[in-house]
Image (cartoon, grey):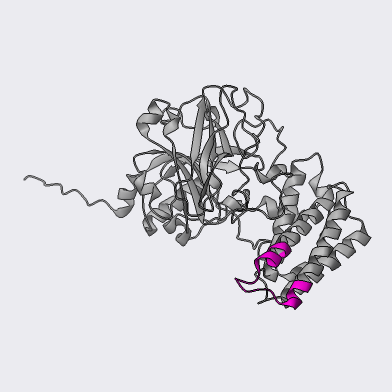
Amino acid sequence: MKVVVIPMARSERDEIEQTARPAVLVRRSDLPVPLTYPARSFFGGLPKLPPQFDWPTAEVRVYRELETVALTFVAQIDLAEVPGAGWSPLPTRGTLYFFCSSVFCGEGHPPCRVLYSPTDGSAYPDRAPPPDLMPLAGTNGDYQVKWLDPNLDFHSKVEFKYPVSFRLFRDFYFREDSVGGELMVEELCKALGPGEPHESDLLQFRRLTEYEKDEDWPFNWLLITYVVRSVLSHVQGDLTGGYYGKPLTDEATMELKRLRAGAIGWLERCRGLTPMDDVDPESKASFRSWWFDVAHAYKELDGKVPTYVSTIAGDLGNAINHTIRCMATQDVDISDHAPPSYVANLARQNHWKTPTERDGKYRHFNTALHQMLGYGSTWQEATEVHLEDVLLLQMEGDLAFFNWHSDIGGVLHFWIDRDALAQRDFSKVAATFESD
């Protein structure tokens, strides 16, 4: 009697398993480090470029006008630190340097350059930024940080430096699929652990009333400087721009001029003080009183000027985080000079959070997943269009970066054709940027 074996149909899980590709997660440090920190692979900071390489430039569209600028440096990866021996198409040695425009408004394919050197990531000193380095998000860009001056502030053009580490995982090809999402979550939890509980951000979307109850700020004069500059930027914008094409009322104009005079007075006071010094109790109380006056004034100006009181409060929270980052890059003990709750809040902003089934299904998590190789995450069609290409680097929106790339709903990819990669021709790299 002949036995006929009927092959069992493959399950959906089996089919998705067949798409598995090895990939590498790129994990940044919780807090930035000084530029002198001896990392070989890192986000932000300054590239350790070989002397024969020029800092890349490109034409960047800003408000419909093309400007030739030096591109933003976003990452340096020493390939000897990246796991993948035996299967990775990347070189086993050498260093990749990633540069990109930081203007993403209406730009699905931002100008970019990736440079490759066969030397390791510590072979050369930091390259000083060129004078034509673009401000983050471009001059007066939609997402330019209002309290920074490109002519004065180093970090208006150079991101903070974050050392990175690498972890292997398996990536899968699927779109909005619960089975694929389950596999994805399993693999990420193998690499990153089960995750931490979700916690509300201490400063993001904080209300005025919550700042009134919190007496921990301002904790140094640098923070005061940034907050005052932010207020002054909004006041001047409201005075010159009017209210959505309509002239300001006399009452609104007088109030804005009063706020401007107060801000200018505080700026003059800050110029004579050391930025990282603690604020004495009398000055602290005086500044808080002034800031609350500004906030309540904007509450009364609601519907008369473009700036909302929530914007004033939001800028304070962002300025607090920015100030702590600045402190982390200096020779100061942050825990002795900044509120521990603020520091801890900043440090955990991109910790791996316990994922949900929905997170896995849509491949978007409350943690920014930076990665090399594999398929990558997408909001539109980038991963499908570049299915046959190699993903050199994916940088998801991350609060480590300034507003130009802090939104978790955005994802930046660097792609290269496999043949070009085999020939080590990195001039063929293309970037895509997608957002929700």
Question: How many numbered callouts?
Answer: 0
Magenta region, residue range: 235-254
Q: Could you say where residue 154 lies in the image, as x and y percent from the top left?
A: 71, 42
**219 to the left or right of 431:** right
Query: Image quadrant for the N terminus?
Result: top left
Q: Could you say where residue 49 lies in the image, as x and y percent from the top left?
A: 60, 27
Q: Is residue 72 above or below residue 410?
A: above
| Residue found farthest to the left | 1
In the depicted view, which residue is nearer to us: 107 or 393? Answer: 107
Residue at image x 91%, y 60%?
Answer: 283
**296 to the left or right of 434:** right
Residue at image x 37%, y 58%?
Answer: 177
State the image quarter where residue 418 is shown.
Answer: top left
Q: Is residue 4 above or below residue 206?
A: above
Residue 339 seen in the current view:
no
User: Is 251 within the magenta?
Assistant: yes
Q: Is residue 95 above or below residue 162?
A: above
Q: Could you say where residue 435 lies in the image, as x and y percent from the top left?
A: 48, 56
Residue 144 seen in the current view:
yes
Q: Is residue 193 above or below residue 299?
A: above
In the depicted view, which residue is nearer to us: 357 or 173? Answer: 173
Residue at image x 66%, y 53%?
Answer: 145
User: Is 21 within the magenta?
Assistant: no
In the depicted view, which residue is nearer to us: 167 or 436? Answer: 436
Residue at image x 38%, y 27%?
Answer: 422
Q: Main secondary structure of the magenta part?
A: helix
Q: Could you say where residue 65 lies in the image, as x and y percent from the top left?
A: 52, 49
In the depicted view, which residue is nearer to us: 355 or 381? Answer: 381
State the image quarter where residue 161 is shown.
Answer: top right
